[in-house]
Image (spheres, grey):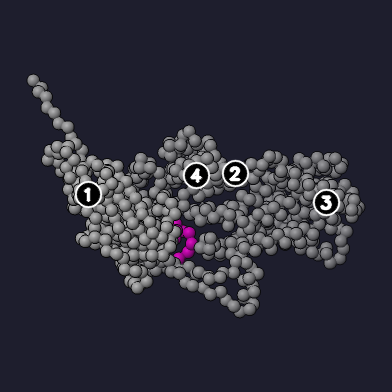
């Protein structure tokens, strides 16, 4: 029990450290973490309301409720590759468990997400979207995405130690995934075979749940949530397995 | 009773790829075209075995590349042995690099918290020990400033103070004792002593023979990844010196014919080295810039060294010492990096050393000089007892004094009744 408390202290401290250091020397500080998703929002709204209208009502609210969790995933995975390589002194420190770095990174980016929440709620209210009790499911969806992200992050960080282009492959993969996930469009407007892709993509499933609770004010689809939770646990297990197998060789290579 | 550390037939092989495929793309291409990366096997450790009882302090010495760091890392559980096994009775903690986990933008206090948490303490425990650590590191005035503003000495003191205060059963230190000034080092040694009194075990590697002699109960000598001996410090240090000499001779034999025969410098004494860098001449001058037969006790001397490099090399280490006939080391100065301290090295040059005063008792002394590669792996050229320095009475009426240093005592007597 004591070890648990100690691990908790360590992670909490490292997350706080990571978060404050992130914008430490910049002029705008924490505002940056809000500014970036807002900028993305404005650009995409401009694109799909003016240039190529998708005809979705309350588009900014529709988009923003999915954009924030996507940004969380995307930032975590793009930064995952350098987590082991860039913290060589910690990884090679006796008694330190490197997966802690992945967890810290995920939680720190989650804080960034949470900081933007008030703005999301503001946008939702502005467009008269229903804010219901469905919002209470938010922590559950976050937890599932968190587990999935940590699993993927572990895989990326470990593999990147051996093959330096894994990081680039992940970037390309994320770009592709952005288009294959209904973040800026509605899944229902794409028919046929693509619907299968969306059902098999656990991230697409999660995004849909975020949109359900924030934009539609409806309860999430529990069966889909359960499926994505299982997927998340499996991915996390695989990620941890990859890390454990390569752990010793990793230290030799670094 | 179970030994603290038992190592049996430990070997570690690193596979060194000549042109390692660092990207996935290259690795896949190689796999498909059947071209495999040619790997060279580098055995860092071969068949290492030793036992260490609880409460003992073991020193590990060996030349650079002998496998010390690899051994210590494996003892800490970092990396996996290629064969053999390690058994430790108790929790092992290691300090292999100082300042791991420190972030330079944060204050010293914040970094103490980070280091404490990394060492397995809770936040409350760290807060309790914080003041003690700050006092040990003597950084009370600077503790809230970012570490970025610290001098390297301050940084090291902080890192070391932090490491010493979170105590495990078995502590492994890799060459981290060369930290701080003499006073700080004494504090560290006192802390070590207390550490051992509570039955904890310590394994450290060091390049300083003084530390080894003064601290260790037993010493392990490694050479080329193998254990040469395990025993008391004095014997081990002699063994280490022998190994260095053997390496020098081996290398000299390899280079035989490639280096020109060095010019003989003086009669008497002896000379050893591979002669990749040679000391061509040593001159001793007194204050009037003449080379006298003898120097008066208390006067200053200037020693000039003409050196020549057989082939261009970026750096040298230099030692200059004054020894008495009876092998007493009166003084020795070491420059670990000549180009760092004195400036870039030309192929041939003269190094001058000025000693403002030599308060030595009248006797014959020798000026022993040596040049080495910067890691002191072997010897380029060492002149032993080749350059005599005769000190004569400085006219200070020495009344039957013996020893080495001339202290000019002033005596007087007064009646008490």
**Label 2, on which residue?**
A17
Q: Nearer the viewer, mark 4 or mark 3?
A: 3
Element assignment for label 3: helix
Q: Position of residue B116 (x, y in %)?
A: 49, 44
Q: Is residue B364 visible?
A: yes
Distance, label 1 to label 4, CA atoms, is 61 Å
The correct choice, above or below, for B169 with respect to B79 in the image is above
- Residues in magenta? B72-84
- CB under 8 Å between callouts 4 and 3? no
Q: What chain does mark 3 sit on?
A: A
Same subunit, labels 1 and 2: the answer reads no
Q: Nearer the viewer, mark 1 or mark 4?
A: 1
Say which residue appears at 64% left-offset and 77% top-offset: B32
Quarter where residue B401 is shown = top left
Q: What chain does mark 2 sit on?
A: A
Q: Position of residue B292 (x, y in %)?
A: 22, 49
Distance, label 1 to label 2, CA atoms, is 67 Å
- CB under 8 Å between callouts 1 and 2? no
């Amino acid at each position: 029990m004591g070890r648990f408390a100690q691990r908790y202290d360590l992670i909490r401290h490292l997350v706080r450290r990571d978060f404050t250091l992130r914008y430490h020397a910049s002029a705008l500080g924490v505002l940056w973490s809000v500014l970036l998703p807002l900028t993305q929002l404005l650009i995409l709204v401009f694109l799909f309301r003016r240039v190529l209208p998708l005809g979705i009502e309350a588009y900014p609210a529709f988009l923003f409720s999915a954009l924030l969790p996507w940004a969380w995933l995307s930032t975590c995975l793009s930064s995952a590759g350098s987590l082991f390589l860039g913290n060589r002194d910690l990884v090679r420190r006796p008694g330190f468990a490197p997966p802690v770095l992945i967890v810290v990174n995920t939680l720190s980016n989650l804080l960034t997400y949470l900081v933007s929440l008030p703005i999301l709620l503001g946008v939702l209210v502005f467009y008269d979207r229903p804010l219901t009790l469905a919002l209470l499911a938010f922590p559950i969806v976050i937890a599932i995405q968190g587990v999935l992200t940590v699993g993927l992050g572990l895989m990326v960080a470990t593999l990147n130690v051996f093959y330096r282009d894994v990081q680039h492959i992940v970037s390309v993969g994320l770009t592709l995934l952005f288009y294959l996930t209904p973040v800026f469009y509605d899944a229902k407007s794409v028919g046929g075979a693509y619907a299968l892709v969306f059902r098999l993509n656990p991230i697409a499933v999660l995004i849909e749940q975020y949109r359900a609770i924030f934009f539609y004010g409806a309860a999430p689809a529990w069966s889909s949530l359960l499926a994505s939770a299982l997927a998340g646990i499996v991915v996390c297990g695989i990620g941890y397995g990859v890390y454990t197998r390569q752990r010793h060789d990793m230290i030799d290579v670094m | 009773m179970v030994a603290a550390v038992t190592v049996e037939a430990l070997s570690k092989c690193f596979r060194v790829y000549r042109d390692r495929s660092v990207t996935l793309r290259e690795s896949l291409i190689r796999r498909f075209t059947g071209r495999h990366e040619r790997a060279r096997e580098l055995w860092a450790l071969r068949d290492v075995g030793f036992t260490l009882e609880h409460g003992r302090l073991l020193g590990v010495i060996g030349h650079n590349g002998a496998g010390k760091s690899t051994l210590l890392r494996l003892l800490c559980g970092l990396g996996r042995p290629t064969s053999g096994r390690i058994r430790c009775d108790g929790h092992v903690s290691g300090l292999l690099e100082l300042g791991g986990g420190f972030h330079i933008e944060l204050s010293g206090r914040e970094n103490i918290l980070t280091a404490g948490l990394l060492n397995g303490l809770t936040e409350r425990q760290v807060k309790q020990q914080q003041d003690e650590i700050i006092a040990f590191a003597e950084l009370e005035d600077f503790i809230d400033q970012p570490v970025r503003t610290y001098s390297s000495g301050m940084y090291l003191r902080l890192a070391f103070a932090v490491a010493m205060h979170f105590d495990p059963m078995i502590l492994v230190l890799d060459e981290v004792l060369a930290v701080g000034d003499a006073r700080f080092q004494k504090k560290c040694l006192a802390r070590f002593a207390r550490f051992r009194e509570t039955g904890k075990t310590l394994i450290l590697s060091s390049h300083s023979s003084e530390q080894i002699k003064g601290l260790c109960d037993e010493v392990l000598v490694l050479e080329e990844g193998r254990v040469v001996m395990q025993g008391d410090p004095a014997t081990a240090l002699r063994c280490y010196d022998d190994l260095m000499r053997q390496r020098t001779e081996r290398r000299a034999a390899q280079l035989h014919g490639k280096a020109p025969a060095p010019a003989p410098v003086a009669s008497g004494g002896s000379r050893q080295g591979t002669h990749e860098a040679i000391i061509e001449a040593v001159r001793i001058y007194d204050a009037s810039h003449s080379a006298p037969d003898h120097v008066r006790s208390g006067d200053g001397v200037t020693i000039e060294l003409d050196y020549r490099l057989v082939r261009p090399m970026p750096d040298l280490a230099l030692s200059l010492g004054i020894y008495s006939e009876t092998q007493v080391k009166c003084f020795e100065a070491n420059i670990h990096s000549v180009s760092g301290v004195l400036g870039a090295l030309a192929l041939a040059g003269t190094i001058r050393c000025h000693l403002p005063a030599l308060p030595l008792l009248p006797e014959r002394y020798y000026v022993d000089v040596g040049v080495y590669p910067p890691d002191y792996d072997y010897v380029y050229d060492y002149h032993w007892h080749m350059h005599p320095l005769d000190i004569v009475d400085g006219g200070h009426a020495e009344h039957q004094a013996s020893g080495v240093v001339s202290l000019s005592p002033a005596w007087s007597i007064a009646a008490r009744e």
